[in-house]
Amino acid sequence: MKAKEFNAKIIKKGKGFAIKLPKELVKQHGLKEGEKYRILPKSKKEMRIIIG
């Protein structure tokens, strides 16, 4: 089963940046505002978000 691809925007938030995720993706994975997640850079153009 191939995973669905989503597009997300990077926005400026205060002195940092944030990734704006689509509602469908947030709901599908049960993500909540304020929770912390790990981000693992794979290469200059790819990163992985670790939930939990």
Image: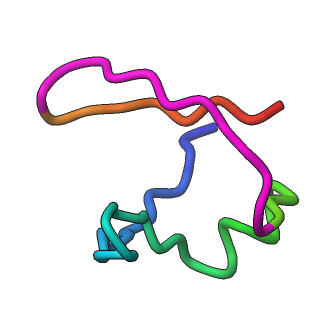
Where residue 10 sits: x, y (%)? 30, 69
Q: Which residues are magenta?
A: 33-44
**Image height of 43 relative to 1, above or below:** above
What coloring was used for the rendering? rainbow
Where residue 6 sits: x, y (%)? 44, 65
Residue with the most extreme front position: 15
Say which quarter of the image contains residue 40. top left
Query: Is residue 23 left or right of 4 when viewed as pictured?
Result: right
Residue nearer the viewer, 41 or 6: 41
Residue with the most extreme bottom position: 23
Q: How many marks?
A: 0
Residue at 83% in and 31% down: 52
Residue nearer the viewer, 30 or 34: 34
Residue at 30% in and 18% down: 42
Query: Is residue 20 left or right of 37 when viewed as pictured?
Result: left
Residue nearer the viewer, 42 or 34: 34
**Image height of 32 relative to 29, above or below:** below
Residue at 35% in and 32% down: 47
Where residue 28 sits: x, y (%)? 80, 63
Residue at 46% in and 30% down: 48
Residue with the most extreme left position: 44
Q: Is residue 47 magenta?
A: no
- Name the quadrant of the N terminus: top right
Where residue 3 sits: x, y (%)? 56, 45
Q: Is residue 36 magenta?
A: yes
**Image height of 2 relative to 48, above or below:** below
Query: Is residue 19 left or right of 44 when viewed as pictured?
Result: right
